[in-house]
Amino acid sequence: MLETIWFLLWGVLWAIYFILDGYDLGIGSLIPILGKSDTDRRTMLNAMGPFWDGNEVWLITAGGVTFAAFPKAYAVMFSGLYTPLMLLLFALIVRGVSLEFRHQVDSPAWRRVWDWGATLGSFLPALILGVAFANIFMGLPLDENGVFQGSFLTLFNPYGLAGGVLFVLLFAMHGALWLTIKSEGDLQQRAAGLARKLWPVLVGLIGAFVVLTIFYTDLLANYLLNPLLLVLLVVPVLALVLLRQQIGKEDWWFAWGLSAVLIGGLTLFGVVGLYPALLPSSISSEYSITIANAASSTLTLSIMLGVTLVFIPIVAGYQFWLHKTFTHKVTEKELNQDGAY
């Protein structure tokens, strides 16, 4: 029972991370597209400025839960997926450094370098996360010892690439909608226009990804055994349909909320489809890393659950307060303050 609870918490923490850091990564990826002037680019950076480092806490939390609750899964993941995980880490470091270094020298060339750093440090994590999770959904080539029998290029199969593109576009939509909330004027209109253009592309891509999922993975097995679980697919589909309606009404907060539901719903749909596997093996199901053979002791899981039930609500409450406090738009007056990027 505890193993199942922690499996669900593991999935929820990843969903929260994708929702929160997703709009940061999306905005960063869109800098070359929407950032027509230095003021535009500064507005985009300050739209995520108070949030990006706090949002990354959920990545650490998800990784920490994997390590503490399912140490064998953590070991296999960080050995088999070492190269993409290191690229993810370095990309996030580059993004953080770019945000802090950009305004240190008053030079267009200097700022241009760090703007590209912020862009690549946002685009690459979105791509890598999508490729990694698509491959996990499909199954990794793990042998009986949990050793990854493949290479870095093994991950770039058609399904993995589809997952990478899907994450990039999901986060780009999420970021564009957040930018409509935090910006004004011409930049806001361009962000809104991009969101409208991305919606039909996302519809087509999500549909194609679901079809590929049927052929490349066994995720639907749990849903065929228990059709009631299909509500996990109904929720993101409904969110996607309503999203277009709210974009048309220019109700940006509601639209951004629906985008969050879409990202979270798709994540949980995939995670629940994996159960009870954490890292399914494409070589043999007997070699899969599951909640049964990867979980920590019952005592460890019990203590962790008590700690989690206390501190996760505190962190969530703080982030709610942070987002509520900084809901105002980024204006030129704010850009002229010392604390602005």
Image: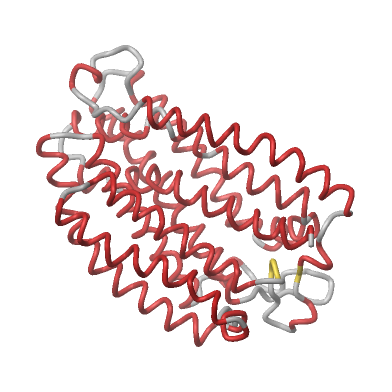
As drawn, 337 above or below 120: above
Image-quadrant location for residue 59:
top right
Q: Report the residue that reaches farthest toward the front.
A: 228
Q: Give 43 or 312, whichever is nearer the viewer.
A: 312
At which x and y percent is residue 268? Answer: 54, 63
In the picture provided, is 178 more to the left or to the right than 279? left
Q: Can you give x and y, in whole percent of width and height, for residue 302 in the image?
A: 83, 48
Residue 189, how many percent across, how many down? 12, 44
The C terminus appears in which quarter of the rendering? Answer: top left
**Residue sticking out furthest to the top:** 338
Residue ranking furthest to the left: 186
For the residue pair 48 and 102, the one nearer the viewer reads as 48
What residue is drawn where x is 20% and y is 24%?
A: 331
Please tell me which residue is depicted at 31% across the width and 33% down the height of the picture: 47
In this rendering, position of residue 10 left or right of residue 183? right
Which is nearer the eye, 20 or 145? Answer: 20
Give the quarter of the image for residue 57: top right
Q: Residue at x 59, y 50 (%)?
A: 13
Question: Where on the picture, by quarter, is residue 64?
Answer: top right
- Which color mode does the image show? secondary structure
Q: Is residue 292 left or right of residue 79?
A: right
Q: How many marks?
A: 0
Q: Which residue sits at x=60%, y=49%?
A: 86
Quadrant where the N terminus sits is bottom right
List x then y, in percent, for residue 159.
Answer: 48, 76
Residue 131, compared with residue 185, is above or below; it is below
